[in-house]
Image (cartoon, coloured by chain):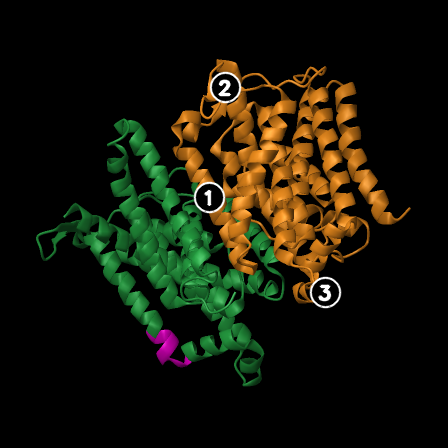
Chain colours: A green, B orange
Amino acid sequence: MLIFEQLLNGLQYGMTLFLMAAGLTLVFGVMGLINLAHGSLYMIGAFACAVVAAATGSFWLGVAASLAAAAAAGALMELLVIRRLYRRDHLDQVLATFALILIFSEGTRWLFGSFPLYLTLPPSLSGTVTLPGGLVYPVFRFAVIVLGLAIAGGLFWLMRGTRLGIRIRAGEADREMIGALGVDISKLYTVVFALGAALAGLAGALVGAVQSVQVGMGEPVLILAFVVVVIGGIGSIGGALVSAILVGMTDSLGKALLPGMLAQVMPQAAANTLGASLASMSVYILMAVVLVWRPTGLFGARA
Amino acid sequence: MSRLALVNIAVLGLLIGGALVAHLTGHAFLVTLATKAAIFALAGVGLNFALGYGGLVSFGHAAFFGIGGYVTGILASHAMSGTPLTTLPYTMNGTNEMLAIWPMVLLVSGLAALAIGALSLRTSGVYFIMVTLAFAQMIYWFAIGWPAYGGEDGLSFYVRNTFPGVPTMRPLNYFLICTALLLLALGFTAVVMRARFGLALQAARRNTQRTVAVGIRPFGIRLTAFVISAMITGLAGSLYADLNRFVSPAMLNWHMSGEIMVFIILGGVGRLMGPVAGAVVFVTMEHLLGGITEYWQVLLGLVLLAIVLWAPGGIVGMLSGRGRDNAH
């Protein structure tokens, strides 16, 4: 039963990672751009949710605000800075978006201070739900899993079944060609970027609701999202989904099981710290194993 | 003498002259600040070896900087407490001799780079960036979770390590030690980049296919460059640990990797003196702007953004009147 609960926790964590990684992998696949500031969009979503929820008293308005604020910030970022970087090499992209992190993080600290903000969940989301088999699980975490799966389904439909998705895939394949066919590429890029940003903002609001909202919250998630993208293969939404769940499970199961296993051979306190850090490392070890086996990720076609 | 050579001499003159003037006028704090700049410059020279000349955009050099620091801190703390590091397979004691610590630092950071590089170089482009970042993060988590050497709190070792015949606690003496190593690394880089190895490395950056076609295998050359680059950055980490007499996981954090990259881009990618100019400007900005506002990193971000967008040759490129001709 404990294992089953940890599996659900891993799935829930994987879903938030997927929301982050989907935007990253889309932006890389379509525009060939590595965006470190994706974590800042996650933070902006969380802060927008906290501020609007505190002002209006409605968590739902907060979630809507997180989507809107992150999409707007993403679109603005793309128009002002990112579009000058498409033709540059990756080094320039890394540094420019690293500069954006510094600006966004310190700017947010200046506006809101260093103290964390907290979100209160509405009553409909703060109880527990009894799953088949008698497992009692928090409603909110369960809702995150369902929402994540729904968004994954939505993204597949968007990419496979709509005109926008066809254009995005065409842009991945050959950006000059779709330009010649009369698609406004720069507008398409802004839309894709804003879409990825909105998903990151949503992830920020969801994680902010269970943990806390503070400056720098995006960075650990960003790096894990990179790991997800690398394992899944750059540009692949399906790969991102599979590898996000894999990474989420590895992390959750590692954190839950390793301290107990180590406690058999060493004192409990030492086992707890060592177990936690081995669990954090396990995700990177997973990545190393996948890379040795398939250097372009599980579902990646090209380097 | 070319304008580029003049700029190079001016950058070094500014660093060394500035420290000497600060010493003569009794500003010991400014000498320490110059030492920090020299150490950061050395870390940058290390990364520039792989990134600037070899085109290997490593976003994980904080790993080597931190490993250098931890090797130094661990050896020094064992020397202080008089306990051996290990008794198997033979007894190994700590030491507080810089001349004994440095080879150990070079060895350990080199071995770490060999493992990380061999795996990371299987990938290229954006995968390489993310993979090096992830490996550095792995070592960061390991340092946090390893309680024997301070874990999250870091490790202090009260007394700076010793150098034969030189009282290292005097700021100017320590500055001169660090600067001497920086000059050695610069000289080494300049010589190697004109030798066959350096030329092959740069050729592989500019056009991998053509390099392969003339019969050079890039993998071994790149791995060697990555290892040398990590060793230089590890040495800088050792000096940084000695400067503060303290090591912490912050030295391994990915922000450190970003900052080492910032020194290079501020100064100029693939320029011999680029990291030196960048580190001097970075430390000066940190000191001056940090005095004005707590949020000085916003300004740093804006400056960095402006340089990436409008002056890709960095400071050395701007001053010498050339764009980024030596970079990719």
Q: Nearer the viewer, residue A199 or B141?
A: B141
Is residue B18 on the magenta stretch? no
Q: Quadrant of the C terminus of chain B?
A: bottom right
In the rendered structure, the residue with mark 1 lies on which chain? Answer: B
Residue B105: image location, x then y, percent: 59, 31
Q: Position of residue A250 (x, y in %)?
A: 31, 50
In the image, the segment drawn in magenta is A157-163
The outermost residue toward the bottom is A181
Residue at left offset 67%, top offset 23%: B29
Q: Which mark is residue B214?
A: 3
Q: Indicate the amino acid at tag 1.
A: Gln
Foreground residue, B129 or B104? B104
Q: Residue at x 36, y 55 (%)?
A: A17
Callout 2: chain: B
Of A255 and A174, nearer the camera is A255
Of circles 2 and 1, the one toward us is 2
Callout 3 crowding tier (Cα within 10 Å): few <14, some 14–19, many ≥20: few
Relative height, residue A64 to residue B43 (above, below): below
Q: Residue at x 81, y 34 (%)?
A: B13
Image depth: mark 2 or mark 3 in front? 3
Q: Nearer the viewer, mark 1 or mark 3?
A: 3
Q: Quadrant of residue B310?
A: bottom right
Instruction: Identify the image quadrant of residue A82.
Output: bottom right
Numbered label attached to residue B137: 1
Identify the residue position indicated by label 2 in the image.
B78
Q: Marks 1 and 3, how far apart in space? A: 38 Å
Q: In the rendered view, does A32 fall on the left or right side of B46?
A: left
Secondary structure beneath label 2:
helix
Q: Chain of mark 3?
A: B
